[in-house]
Image (cartoon, rainbow, N blue to C red):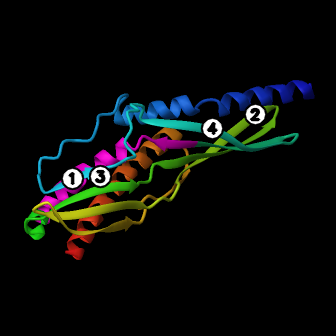
Amino acid sequence: MKLKLLFISYVFIQFATSCYGPRKVNSWIADKYGTTLNSQPKIKDDYFSVSSKLMTNDQQASTTVKESKGLLPLIFYWKGHYVNTVTLNPKIPINTFTTAFQSYANSKQLKQKLNGQKIELTIEQVPTIFMIDDKWQLVWFIYAFGWDIFSVVPEKNDMVLSYRMSKDNSETKKGTITIPDQNTALEHLRRVKEGTWDYMNQYDEAIKAMAKKTVDKIIGEL
């Protein structure tokens, strides 16, 4: 009987921990951003450009790797920990950044402040990685009772941009701008899919905030 219960517990855990993995997580990201990603949005203004060597021809929205962090199987209590590490396609933040930069730069009259200069921005580094952390527990006595506690945690990675200003084909100024990562962790989540989407919404807003800070830094250095 004890062996039977242990086997049932094992099957329950395998089922519980296989409810989602890399394929499922990638499908959630694709539901938000699309199954294929477009190249950078066209910039309508002629006084700035945004480029990045991070851009690739990859159309997949994300890649995810699942890793077990430990398992503690006791007689009446089991617990485990595993992590899905998600790497977003750089097109996602770069496109979001470009659109937000254009809108905010126009609202701040950056073109007028440049006074005939043009600015070329190159995104050297951008946050793209976050972890879905899952700590699960199982207690059984005749029946099994289990629960998970999820967290979505960013891998902190500042945005780094280089810029070059020019006028009449002559360079007037160049430099580097570093914007601290604005993303924050979402902890003690009960629903992993909804929690992941909440994080992605926050992520988009963080990238937009970093685009605005970039505009402000450029204006401050004129």
Left or right, 59 with respect to 6, comes to left
Q: Which residue is mark 2?
A: 144
Q: How packed is label 1: few (under 14 Cα within 10 Å), some, or many (20 or more)? A: some
Residue numbers of the magenta segment: 85-109
How many discs appear? 4
Left or right, 109 with respect to 206, comes to left
User: Quick check: can you spot residue 191?
Assistant: no
Alpha-carbon span between mark 2 and mark 3: 47 Å
Residue nearer the viewer, 150 or 153: 153
Task: Specify the amino acid type for callout 1.
Answer: Ser
Q: Position of residue 100 (x, y in %)?
A: 24, 53
Q: Which residue is mark 3?
A: 97
> Quick one: label 2 or label 1, which is nearer the N terminus?
1
Q: Which residue is mark 4?
A: 66
Task: Specify the amino acid type for callout 3.
Answer: Phe
Label 2 or label 1, whichever lies nearer to me, is 1
Q: Position of residue 49 (x, y in %)?
A: 21, 52
Let me know if residue 149 is in the magenta part. Answer: no
Q: Position of residue 124 (x, y in %)?
A: 39, 55
Left or right, 36 with respect to 150, comes to left
Q: Which residue is mark 1?
A: 49
Q: How packed is label 2: few (under 14 Cα within 10 Å), some, or many (20 or more)? A: some
> Quick one: label 1 or label 3, which is nearer the N terminus?
1
Residue nearer the viewer, 159 or 185: 159
